[in-house]
Amino acid sequence: MVDLAYRSLADYKQAKQQASAQPEGFWEDIANQFEWHQKWNKALTFDFHKPEVKWFLGGKLNITENCLDRHVKTQPNRTAIIFEPNDPKETAQHISYKELHSRVCRVANMLKKNGAKKGDRICLYMPMVPELAVTVLACARIGAIHSVVFAGFSAAALAARINDADCIMLVTADGGFRGAKVTPLKDIADEALTHCKSINTSIVLKRTGQEVAWNDIDVWWHEALAEVDDLCPAEIMDSEDPLFILYTSGSTGKPKGMVHTCGGYMVYTAYSFQNVFQYEKGDIYWCTADIGWITGHSYILYGPLAVGATTVMFEGVPSYPGYDRFWEVCAKHKVNQFYTAPTAIRALQKHPVDLVSKHDLSSLKVLGSVGEPINAEAWHWYDDNVGKNNCPIVDTWWQTETGGILITSLAGITEQKPTYATLPMPGIQAVLLDNEGNELVCKNEGILAIKHPWPSIARTIWGDHERYKNVYFSAYPGYYFPGDGALRDAEGNYRITGRVDDVVIVSGHNLGTAPIENALNEHPNVVESAVVGFPHDIKGNALHAFVITKDAVYDNEALVTALRALVAKTIGPIAKPDRIQVVSGLPKTRSGKIMRRILRKLASGEFDQLGDVSTLLNPDVIENIKRNN
């Protein structure tokens, strides 16, 4: 097993000092711990104004050789993945590094035999089963670019992502288990493919056994797999070759296909995984995320496997068959590091605490939080009842765009502070800016930004570099702008205060308001809409849609039901507004801009905190919204 972790506060302080004094040398030392076919000739070139970032220029590698082959040589029988299925009566799988390597090579050959090659984009729309993990790695093995689409997205959302990347192949399943529900993935995929011209082959895994329609391009996974062997040499990739595209919601327009590359992403995810969670040989680590999100990419698969860890992959949900499922799985597999979302913690703390205490959680050493800032009440419940005040909690701040964790405590090494992500990782140069882009010093509050690149920063938006520049580098030239505000205490700890753009984090998922508004506006009775977030006990934030209709009906359940269904069909169930309010108008400036700040206050019921509304073009609509709230 590779060990990249700082095991003491002295190690950490030394790393901070080196990263500050010699950032390129700092990352080169870490990159040297991996296997390269050819070493790089220059560590870094970057220009945040273009913007352009390149790490380990000229370096040649394949990430799967670092995640699989080198561990097969040193620990072939160590468990790489523990698969815990949705139904606890189904036997868990323990897949060794040797077995995982064999499966990946076989699936890589299956992809090649069906026409996939280096540089092709392959879309994965699959349940949380080992075959998803294997297919991700198989794509990387042959140099194909994987684009995983979360299996909760609609046919329209799936089609948009396939078309944006011009994917030539889809890998899906007949269906997927999620709690008591069965998702008809093949049916959804078939609907999506009626709008996709680029797909030549659709490989279908049999998971649920349900009846499915069959098309000319369809191939059964088990039949295709029977035709190939498990000998597949790894394609040699350039450090800057794309590894994957992963779509994230934008504040305007279509989703953004963030592009991550082979070398830098590998280095950073492995480094951050081992340091944040203080993973040690023999530990059992469990991240409860879905591989359809960046957390699953970086901290179920690539980060843990790159250092030779044992990682748990969970198909189910925390409430099935009971609200103690997480704790039952932790006890069953003797989990040491447990990484989940505040949404899940808040949902579980609503239930009797004996659902936690009846399970033996003594194996736990580290707890983690991801997806959004964790509130104090949830933090203390997690600490008291799950960690028994004996497990450090790492409250991690990062994004799809960053590729890896940027601000966090390191478990048991640096101090934690409830509701604070705490300190930037060694090698991460975080700053606070005022609205004019000036750096703020000492204890302060402002706009979070990063002033120097790190290896796993996304390199571009697929097919739209200008948008990448406009979204992340134009607001504050010379800095990466993540879209979050933050406050910093006297010790330098950061607390993320929320989005400063039109993205709402719901249950840990970034949801752009513009695509939801576009979906609502498709309804023939909708003239205009505006969507904002409001605080929610479980989800952190929920969505409130203000809708102007042609027919002034303020209590139309049929309309509300139709609009929620329209959003679910267009984007997916996760984007459905919790509240839809029909209004006579929206508060606007004289230039026609919707005042979302005011709508957020109205959605939150903060009627006495609206501030000055005299400059609005139509201040009278506020009273109408209040009356019908």
Image (cartoon, helix red, strand yellow):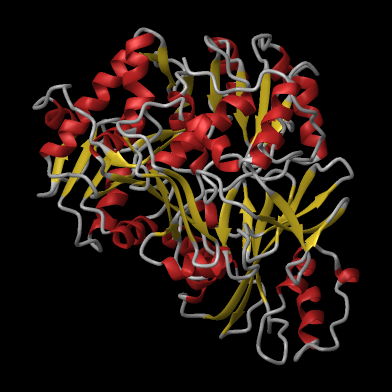
How many marks on residues?
A: 0
- Does residue 15 appear to the left or right of 444 in the view shown? left
351 or 251: nearer the viewer: 251
264 or 516: nearer the viewer: 264
Viewport quadrant of the C terminus: bottom right
- Does residue 344 appear to the left or right of 350 in the view shown? left
- Does residue 138 appear to the left or right of 429 in the view shown? left
153 or 29: nearer the viewer: 29
Picture coordinates of residue 131, whole percent (x, y): 31, 29
Residue 171 vertical position relative to residue 80 in the rendered view, above or below: below
Residue 176 vertical position relative to residue 565 in the rendered view, above or below: above
Picture coordinates of residue 511, whole percent (x, y): 56, 57
Would residue 316 be visible to someone looking at this image? no
Picture coordinates of residue 349, whole percent (x, y): 74, 31
The answer to which image quadrant residue 331 occupies is top right
Residue 83 vertical position relative to residue 267 in the rendered view, above or below: above
Residue 452 vertical position relative to residue 393 in the rendered view, above or below: below
Q: Residue at x 25, y 63 (%)?
A: 195
Q: Residue at x 72, y 44 (%)?
A: 373
Would residue 213 be visible to someone looking at this image? yes
- Does residue 387 appear to the left or right of 403 in the view shown? right
Q: Residue at x 65, y 67 (%)?
A: 476
Q: Residue at x 31, y 20 (%)?
A: 69
Picture coordinates of residue 322, whole percent (x, y): 59, 24
